[in-house]
Image: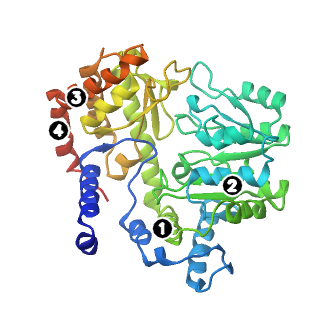
Amino acid sequence: MKNLKQTDSGIYDLIKEEEKRQEEVLEMIPSENYTSKAVMEALGSVLTNKYSEGYPQKRYYQGNKIIDSVEILAVERAKKLFGVPYANVQPYSGSPANTAVYLALLKPFEDKIMGLTLSFGGHLTHGSPVSFSGKYFKIVHYELNEKGLLDYEKIEKLALAEKPKIIVCGATAYPRVIDFKKFGEIADSIDAYLLADISHIAGLIVGEIHPSPVAYADIIMTTTHKTLRGPRGAILMVTNKGLKKDSELGDKIEKAVFPGLQGGPHDNQTAAIAVSLLEATQPNFKKYSKQVVKNAKALSKELLKFEFSLISGGTDNHLLLIDLTNKKINGALGAYALEVSGIVVNKNAVPNDPMPPFYPSGIRIGTPALTTRGMKEKEMVRIAKWISDVIEEIKGDELPKEKESRSYFWKEFRRKVRENKSLLKVNEEIKEFCQKFPVP
């Protein structure tokens, strides 16, 4: 990056600092991963310079012959990898991709979406009242049962009573296998579209570790930067089932993406997505996906030994959702202390969480990035011990119930944690540990 260093040393220095941070910590946010150098080279290529409003062979700008080939290649790779007849690689990310589906199929303020409640593991775009999806469409939510699992019988009853036009299945914090077949049957029973949001598990589906929704959903949306290990972006797909239901479904989604929501696609992003899709066809990607789940299960097993409360009791995929209530520590406090110690997770609501979103009761952790660095089950044992040590160190430092007292408490808590010698010792141990597992 010599040119950047000469032109803007400030940004150069910040990028190098971030590079160092990523190398020296345990990145355990389930939605984060490390891309390959090849993906980053495509993302930083001259394709950044081109403007390409429209679709291949139907552009509003000249000079897109090569860009057309790039996008066609990305589309064909997506179709082949997931086994679908239609794919659109232009969505900038997951939220606008889901928005495009709603725009294509629903009437604002009239039609109804049914999705998993945000606080039970759903996504903002699945109908949260603070999101456009909850503001512009009628919403009905389903929740998890007392065991932290999807209750398909209750979901079916709710669908029959509410008759939504779209049912969204998929989650951001659900550690178990999703029964796409059952969701498909429920959607079919009320003639609703089934949108499978597989953003978190796309890589596991490609790696044949999680069942695919292709035979049961009408539309599939995935981001490309989580378990798929691509750049930030998204793909919208229509299945054969979807086209049988509505032969114009692909056209409707295409028009909703452009010109409905977006202008020109990010051609450099499209190329990087194409590279990641090619990488996902390689035999080592299946090995990687299997190891992600093995690591998550090993981590779950060890954390249970330390008496952590895992939502649903464990995991079948790449993530774990932990309720820290029994440890007498708030999720926000736990996440901050872990970060100071070199373990990066995110605070997260748990089912029936009595706390507000900024101070939720839980944390969400995952193994995709650790696995990309080559870590295996043996390393998960050590990481679980570090997590336990950190939480035990701050255990009992309870968040005040009075909202007025929280600001001062939070400020003092962060100061104490930053100066805590035990946590700083863990941080040094993790830095040394990370040197054995280089970032790709």
- N-terminal label among 4 and 2: 2
Q: Which residue is situated farthest in the front direction here?
A: 404
Work out whether residue 438 can be spotted: no
Q: CA distance from mark 3 to mark 4?
A: 21 Å
Identity of the residue drawn at 30% across and 38% down: 343
Identity of the residue drawn at 32% across and 32% down: 336
Q: Amino acid at mark 4?
A: Glu
Does 435 appear above or below 30? Answer: below
- N-terminal label among 1 and 3: 1
SS under mark 4: helix
Q: CA distance from mark 1 to mark 3?
A: 41 Å
Rendered image quadrant of residue 127: top right
- N-terminal label among 4 and 1: 1
- Whole-percent x, y for residue 53 in the image: 63, 73
Mark number, residue 429 = 4
Q: CA distance from mark 2 to mark 3?
A: 44 Å
Mark number, residue 415 = 3
- Whole-percent x, y for residue 327 in the image: 36, 17
Identity of the residue drawn at 29% across and 27% down: 411
Q: Which residue is mark 1?
A: 272
Q: Amino acid at mark 3?
A: Arg
Work out whether residue 387 can be spotted: yes
